[in-house]
Amino acid sequence: MNKFLERLEQGTMVIDGAMGTMLHARGIGFDKCFDELNITNPAAVADIHREYIEAGAQLVITNTFGANRYKLSKHGLQDDVVEINRAGVELAKRIVSSSFKDVLIAGDVGPLGVRIAPFGRVKPEEARAAFAEQITALTDAGADLIVIETMSDLYEIQEAIKAAKESSSLPVVATVTFTRDDVTLLGDDPIKVARKLHAAGADVIGVNCSGGPSQLLRILKQMRLAVPSGKFWVKPNAGWPEQVSGRIMYPADPEYFGEYALSLREAGANVVGGCCGTTPQHIAAMKKALESSPAPVVDIQVSEDIESSEISDVEPPTQLAQKLADGKFAICVEMDPPRGLSTHKLLAGASLLYDAGADIINVADSPMARMRMSAWAVCDVVQRKIGVETTLHFPTRGRNLLRVQGDLLAAHAIGLRNVFVVMGDPTSIGDYPEATDNYDLVPSGLIKLIKQGFNAGMDHSGTSIGQPTNFFVGAALNLCPSDMDNEVKNLHRKIKAGADFFLTQPIYRPEEGPKLIEAYEAKHGKLHQPILAGVLPLVSAKHANFLHNEVPGVSIPDEARKRIEAAGEDGVKVGIELAVELIQQIRGWASGLYIMPQFHKYDMVAEIIEAVK
């Protein structure tokens, strides 16, 4: 048996961390060919190998990640494939043979940097030949194993595995990288990936790069369930990168990696190390943690023919879902998309609200049927630039069945998970009254489509969409309806369809919530879904009178209207007081708030949030 495979039988191995991160820290720009440094600056590469070994790495990976003819051609080095790969192995061998004879050397093979058929023009046999050229050079130079890593295309990595099996007798490690959604860039989930790599003949399979240890732990568990008999290799990044003062920084520190090394081993990892952003300090922390704690017995009893759909979705719940599940009072604030291209004011408002303590920003979709920027684009901008989770308002009106499903896929693809399903305002009241107002689904039908279809991995026709979505779905609720029986009926229909939570229309009387809840529970039993009560702060006597007299379903108590009228120019101050008093009274039955700022008075809402937090 190969000594690498023998070593795996003795316990979890610790391997090295990032080569590129360490080279960049030495002042080498990312525009340079790192692989060429094996020839032009071998001392820098050798020093990094030595640092990782001294930190505890039992295996080092050669500096040949991009040393294939396609990537090297970008630097005019396509004829130097053999020389660069041989030099990479020989550098590592010199360090190992000098003082660290038990350390193994893995010949590193990365993506070709081109798309292969059916997603690109490079033919599979051409890709296989390029991989074989590199792998043969690594093997002939004396590598102990071949590691094919950071792949995102299953077609490409399968060609690489074939090339390795045909041109080398060394063990083959095959690992894939995933997006934040726990799928590859081409949409393949960890279960499919694990089975494909195992079936292709890889001796060890796994995941590298992607996000931090937490994400890779989730992915490892799925892979382990899919292939219980497999050997697993896990190399996480030091978290998701961020740009700070022009530099790329990774947030996860060595101590954090040390803690996760134990979790990865317990989940079945045979090999652990680090990828982008990790240093010898990260590796030392992992080695120390593993040595200080005895290895647990890993026992995973799952049939290898288990279907992907039978393995529960391990994507974490949204922050809103988790907060409500934990019984914590959630605060959501509604914001309207801009009418034009500029998002500066919206982002400034979202930042103010987030700093004040808002948990979620709800983004309305064409409120009052007025033309505005698409809501899911605004959600994406807010989540990326402010860092606060959003809820996408998703009206059924104006969308046929094809558009509904396409828009849902688009929303999920850009990281939106909370959706609030509503009918939407009729176009007749907006600025394009002649626009098409048709729809194929009522809200309860759309909720069913999402919860029982998309979240189960199927579209409306029952066709697979590749993997389940993970939407957390809200629905509308009127706490002071003109027809209580009909509202209870609609509420029950939405619950049966799968609604996770409810947002209500604005209320001004705290007793309105318990009345409807009691009416529902008298007929259908306990209401388990959380309710986020609508709060629309009053800003003046004129505003209060308009809402009370002209907006259907809104009834403001006489006392509240008298107080704000007596306030005169201090109407906003009294509006804040009234909102805070109302919120304190609804805490007994509401799971959170759904605040609707009027006239973009985000500072007013921020003051309310700070008062009730």
Image (spheres, helix red, strand yellow):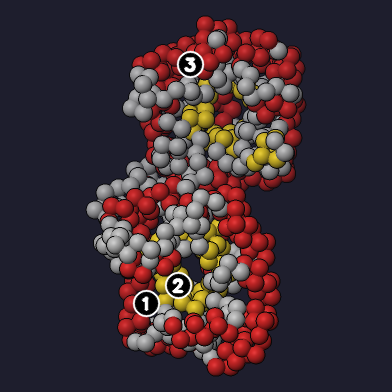
- Count neighbours of disc 1 (C-alpha within 10 A) and say few if under 14, some if 14 to 19, many if 20 or more: many
Element at label 1: helix
Occupied quadrant, residue 7? top right
Q: Residue 159: where, in percent of width, then height? A: 40, 22
In the picture, the disc for residue 502 is 2
Q: Residue 262: where, in percent of width, then height? A: 64, 44
**Residue that appears at 56% across and 63% down:** 360
**Residue that appears at 37% across and 77% down:** 491
Question: What residue is pinned by disc 1?
Answer: 491
Label 1, label 3: how far apart the Cα atoms are: 59 Å
- Count neighbours of disc 2 (C-alpha within 10 A) and say few if under 14, some if 14 to 19, many if 20 or more: many
Label 2, label 1: how far apart the Cα atoms are: 9 Å
In the picture, the disc for residue 70 is 3
Q: Is residue 376 above or below residue 326?
A: above
Q: Residue 406: where, in percent of width, then height? A: 34, 50
**Residue that appears at 63% across and 64% down:** 353
